[in-house]
Image (cartoon, helix red, strand yellow):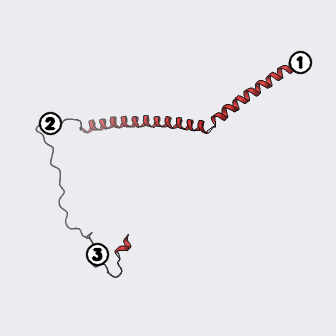
């Protein structure tokens, strides 16, 4: 008699446990719950991306400061010292092959401007 009562109680407990597990899983799979989970994941991903962007920006500022220091760009311009004049390239001679074309050289019978559009 005690054996039957034990197995009946164990079976009932297993049934209750399985039923609660199934009900929890079904509640997690409702459209509202799935939408809430997706929204939470999107917000979490947004925070991670924001943190990443801030880290990249801080690294850029630090590297820019290092490069400026290495190149001497952070030193102030001395008074009385002016910047050098910009260099000008010598005027190049005329190009060997002209890049401008005239429409007057094209045959007028086969050219239709409306076909270009």
Residue at x 36%, y 34% (from the top left corner):
58
Mark 2 is surrounded, within 10 Å at the Cα level, by few (under 14), some (14 to 19) or many (20 or more) other residues, namely: few
> Can you identify the residue that label 3 sits on?
103
Camera-nearest label, 3 or 1: 1
Residue 103 placement: quadrant: bottom left
Q: Nearer the viewer, residue 105 or 44?
A: 44
Residue 111, percent from left and from top: 35, 78
> Which residue is rendered at x = 36% and y = 73% of the image?
114
Comes first in the chain, label 3 or label 1: 1
Asked whether disc 2 touches disc 3, contact meaning CB atoms under 8 Å apart, the reply is no
Instruction: Name the spot of residue 112 as percent of width and height, x first.
Output: 35, 77
Q: Decide which of 34, 2 is in the foreground and name it.
A: 34
Alpha carbon separation for disc pair 1 and 2: 104 Å
Q: Residue furthest front?
A: 32
Name the side, left or right, on which 98 lies relative to 6: left
Q: Hey, which quadrant is residue 53 in on the image?
A: top left
Above or below, comparing residue 96 to residue 56 in the picture? below
Q: Residue at label 2?
A: 78
96 horizontally vs 4: left or right: left
Judge depth for marks 1 and 2 and give the one in front: 1
Q: Specify the farthest residue to the left.
A: 80
Q: Label 1: state its secondary structure.
A: loop
Residue 102: x and y, percent?
26, 74
User: Who's the residue at 55% across and 38% down the image?
Assistant: 38
Whether residue 98 is situated above or below residue 36 in the rendered picture: below
In the image, which disc is placed on residue 1?
A: 1
Marks 3 and 1 sit apart, C-alpha to C-alpha, by 111 Å
SS type, badge 3: helix
Mark 1 or mark 2: name the one nearer the start of the chain: 1
Q: Quadrant of the N terminus?
A: top right
Rendered view: 98 above or below 18: below
Q: What element carries label 2?
A: loop
């Amino acid at each position: 008699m005690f054996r039957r009562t034990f197995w009946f109680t164990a079976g009932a407990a297993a049934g209750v446990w399985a039923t609660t597990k199934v009900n929890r899983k079904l509640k997690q799979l409702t459209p509202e719950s799935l939408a809430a989970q997706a929204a939470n994941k999107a917000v979490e991903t947004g925070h991670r991306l924001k943190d990443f962007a801030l880290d990249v920006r801080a690294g850029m500022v630090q590297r820019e400061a290092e490069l400026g220091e290495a190149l001497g760009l952070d030193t102030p311009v001395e008074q009385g010292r002016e910047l050098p004049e910009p260099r000008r390239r010598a005027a190049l001679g005329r190009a060997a092959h002209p890049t401008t074309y005239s429409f007057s050289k094209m045959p007028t019978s086969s050219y239709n401007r409306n076909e270009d559009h």
